[in-house]
Image (cartoon, helix red, strand yellow):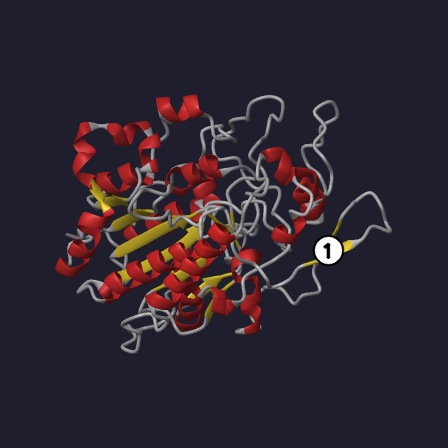
Amino acid sequence: MAAETSSATLSPIKTVVVLVQENRSFDHMLGWFKTLNPEIDGVTGSESNPISTSDPNSTQVNFQDKAGYVDPDPGHSFQAIYEQVSGKTWDTNNPDPNPEIKMNGFVQNAERTKPGLSETVMNGFKPEAVPVFKELVTEFAVCDRWFASLPASTQPNRLYVHSATSHGAMSNNTQQLIEGFPQKTIFESLEENGFSFGIYYQSFPSTAFYRNLRQLKYVDNFHQYDLSFKRHCEKGKLPNYVVIEPRYFDILTAAANDDHPSHDVSEGQKLVKEIYEALRSSPQWNEILLLVIYDEHGGFYDHVPTPTGVPSPDDLVGPEPYYFKFDRLGCRVPAIMVSPWIERGTVLHRPSGPDPTSEFEHSSIAATLKKIFNLKEFLTKRDAWAGSFDIVVNRSSPRTDCPGRISTSSSSIEGRSLERHLSIQTG
């Protein structure tokens, strides 16, 4: 049951729910939503990247609205992202740790990875192709300036989500993940202040990569999503902080629903629809704030320059040959916020503080939880700097007109998934 303490702020939010999906940029998933709301910093179709950044006469590849099933997976290593955002290839012998950010190397990097891949990288989904997101963005809020915490792959960014640091990691290092990362997490901060948390996982809980969460005392904080989430919603037993981990792999009885290429985004749409409808029907609905984000951009084009000059969380330096100082953010990713305390059609841009350079990034989750629940201290210098997204709560009373169900039927989503599956079988 959601805990309450006298130290809590006056926020109407008592339960924060977070779902982190995989490897899609803002422009790829939500860029064309500018057609629904011109206030969204999306795309117009005039955006392009050259095939060669060194050739002033190079052919340009324009960004289009024909995104669909994605295979293979675009590059999103540190080196790949370096080229995507700067237009320069990483040179170990002559490194430039602070390149000029031009966002013009996506096509060049994609074509180097696989000829023709730029067509995948330079396409986004029409709003009607991701109907659940279309309804949530229309009914609630979208943040068009949320960045990955560092220009690197999945696990380092996921580590920032709950600890505001990757403890020096900048790649998916299997040995480090097995050993577990030692930093303090937001879960411990919540517990120390008398608040509750729960992790609802489908494949496996990647949150177990934090070493401290492997302690026996936390075993009851982990729940199998299919067995527990809807039941806890119905009974009003969701904890103060809810983390939902998607299905990262296909299994015999169900497809992966994390949106990581080559997984079908229609499966992710079904998951978000299911989560929303379970929360909407819960007696806790009027105390809930749901955040749906993506861990990193997955190599897909985005036009907004990645911020530089950000504070290192803990002054650690990444391993050779990059020696990254954790002073640049990664690419912009989708961020959707849902609550009855949000006005329809809200668009959240950059935060107003706490620092003049503050941005929304994964450390904003820890920053927001600290603010909502009046926690005693920040985790690192990064969440102390990051903007808190509680400002999206922009009403004085909860709405009564929030849809009970997402209007797009699950059958139509399933139909697209089946159609894609059959085309692969017969193609």
Above or below, 189 against 122 in this view is above
Q: Position of residue 413 (x, y in %)?
A: 39, 64
For this orientation, the residue located farthest to the left is 235
Q: Is residue 424 left or right of residue 339?
A: right
Q: Name which residue lies at 82% across and 43% down.
A: 54
For mark 1, what is the residue?
A: 61
Q: Is residue 20 left or right of residue 26?
A: left
Identify the image quadrant of residue 95: top right
Q: Name which residue lies at 52% across and 62% down.
A: 30
Observer-nearest of 119 and 399 = 119
Identify the image quadrant of residue 247: top left
* Residue 40 appears anywhere in the view: no
What amino acid is labelled 1 in the image? Val
Question: Is disc 1 placed on a helix, strand or loop?
Answer: strand
Observer-nearest of 343 and 216 = 216
Q: Name which residue lies at 15% across and 58% down.
A: 236
For this orientation, the residue located farthest to the right is 57
Q: Name which residue lies at 50% across and 45% down.
A: 296
Q: Position of residue 13 (x, y in %)?
A: 28, 60
* Residue 356 appears anywhere in the view: yes
